[in-house]
Amino acid sequence: MDVQKHNLVGIELLRIVAMMMVVGLHYLNFGGILWSEAVMNRRIAWGIEAFLFVAVNCYVLISGYFLVKAKNFHWSKVGALWAHTAFYALLFTLAAIVYTGKWNLAGIVHSLLPIRYTMYWFVTAYMGMYILSPYLSRLTCHLEKNEYKKFLMILTGLFVLYSFLRQDADPFNIGGGYTMAWFCVLFLWGGYIRLFGEDFLRRFSQREVFLIYVLASLFTFLAKKPMHYFFDLIDVHISGHSFSGFYMYNSPSVLLASLALFVFFLRLEISSERIKRCIQRIAPLSFGVYLIHEHPFIRSQLWGHWIHLKPLYASPYFLLHFVSTVLLVFLVCILLDKVRDWMFSLVKRFPGGSGPEGR
């Protein structure tokens, strides 16, 4: 399968949609609606959460899809990713120092080394996967289709099924999917779709693929309470507050939903040239949305002071506020990252708008 046979605009659109989903996840979590006393809106929020939980997996699947056939490894992209991350890390750390009036030398050092100090967990995990990507690619390109399929089934069995059923122990330190190891598994899934996925892509229609995404996400939402009873039955004792059920990046239903949504956008045809141009302009800036709104200082201000969600916990306008806030945060961050992109282009030392698209 050749990537050129597919409409790449669909994948670019998925990058945009996935980042909007990330903003939505942070709204629900850091805004506190998932833990509120308003029963109806809390249940709605958990339902929305299930459909958005594929965002990170899809973002990494995109990289695996492109990187598996990359001819050369570019350390310049590692530098560009570090520069992009460190720019916002340092900028907002300095803003926090000015705002609080407290000098923080350790914070400045950490902002210059954001990947080493895991200021953004996603970037740290992604960077490790990206550095390993040429070796993962060599491995996969030397596997026959059946060998590759067996390899994926073994990885999925270990890191999805077994790790999920042993949440109390996490035997392989998969951390619910917040680790480089899980990103490598997603890389291999994206690579398989790129190399051998033609039969898989033809097996299901667009409607069927989207239905799989919907049903898998619904399962994530509906299965949380039954899983409590299941773990009680097998005498696995876990805290009810910390137990997240299928709401983990490496859960079976989230992985299935992620793969289905990725395939849906992979085959998506967009006819409007104007929409295509708009997508191609926004997509490279989407990673900046994460770096801006997820910086610890900005995150605390955004959800703790600038956007007040507590009055909306029981409000009938919760969904309207959710949608409008996600779009507004995304738009503002896109505009800010466009300024950063322009500044980087002036310096001409780093490629502008570089995110983990893996191309």
Image: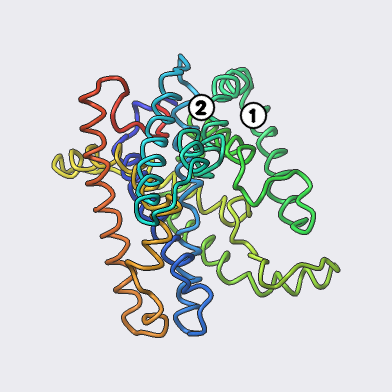
Q: Which mark is residue 195?
A: 2
Q: Which mark is residue 35?
A: none
Q: Which mark is residue 148?
A: 1
Up the image or down, 331 lies above or below 4; here it is below
Q: On the image, which quarter does residue 128 sit in? A: top right
Q: Nearer the viewer, residue 235 or 318?
A: 318
Q: Where residue 142 appears, x then y in whole percent?
A: 62, 17
Question: Within 10 Å of the Cα at label 1, are there few (<14), some (14-19), or many (20+) other Cα atoms?
Answer: many
Q: Amino acid at mark 2?
A: Leu
Q: Name the image quarter holding the N terminus.
A: top left
Q: Name the image quarter holding the C terminus.
A: top left
Seen from this angle, which residue lies furthest top? Answer: 72
Up the image or down, 37 lies above or below 75; here it is below
**Real-space Cα separation, disc 1 to disc 2, in angstroms:** 10 Å
Residue at 46% of width from left, 62% of height from top?
51
Q: Where residue 18 appears, x then y in whole percent?
A: 39, 50
Q: Amino acid at mark 1?
A: Tyr
